[in-house]
Amino acid sequence: MANLTLGKDIADKAIEADPHYAVGKQILAYLNVYLGYVEERKGADAAALSSYRDALNIWKPMATKAATDVDTGLRVASTEIKVANLLAKGGHYDDATAAYQQALSDAGPLTKTGVPNEWALYVVADASSGLGDMFAAQARRHVREKKTQEWDQARSWYQRSAEAWRQVHNPGAMNPGGFDCGSPKRVTAALAAIP
């Protein structure tokens, strides 16, 4: 953690010296994501959420300026999933849904080309799985009439995730952008657990 913090301080100083230093901004955003990972694993979800949002505050303007830069757009989408996961964990379902939907909106079109973008497939798989997890969690808490509808929603999202995973050539623990991600095995297990 100390090395990540030191790296963040160095990147901050480099950007302060040259606000147009794009590589420094990319490095700083990734450092924020990795700090978020560490905080999340320590159980410091508020600090992790803050780090992920700091990364988004760097990447979103970069993605807007360079609309043809697919990778930066997918970095935004991958980070939106990290934010959504924490929001869902904290019970902020509306905000989590918005973040998952934003990730799907950013990545979805890149999966519908002749040769789907592999990173975009990971994003669609993870965002869809996250929505499935959220509906499954809600179904476990609600009364019978709403439960069926939420289980159906969870199943639908898990199926969409499974379809995206089927298109990924060799699924790994990290997506092509270096973000940790779910797995087809986990989605299959979640589908099998739906009553």
Image (cartoon, rainbow, N blue to C red):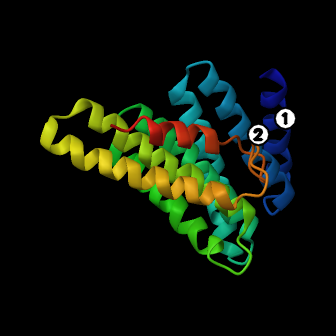
Residue shown at 58% from the left, 49% from the top: 126
Mark sitting on residue 31: 2
57 relative to 180 in the view: left or right: left
The N terminus lies in which quarter of the figure? top right
Q: Position of residue 174 (x, y in %)?
A: 75, 43
Q: Give the image quarter of residue 13.
A: top right
Q: Position of residue 160 (x, y in %)?
A: 50, 58
Q: Secondary structure at mark 1?
A: helix
Q: CA distance from mark 1 to mark 2?
A: 7 Å
Which badge, 1 or 2, is on the more N-terminal residue? 1
Nearer the observer: mark 1 or 2; the answer is 2
Q: Are marks 1 and 2 in contact (CB under 8 Å)?
A: yes
Q: Is 91 in front, or is 170? A: 170
105 relative to 145 in the view: left or right: right
Would you name the residue on which mark 1 appears? 7
Q: Where is 79 relative to 49, above or below? A: below
Residue shown at 58% from the left, 37% from the top: 186
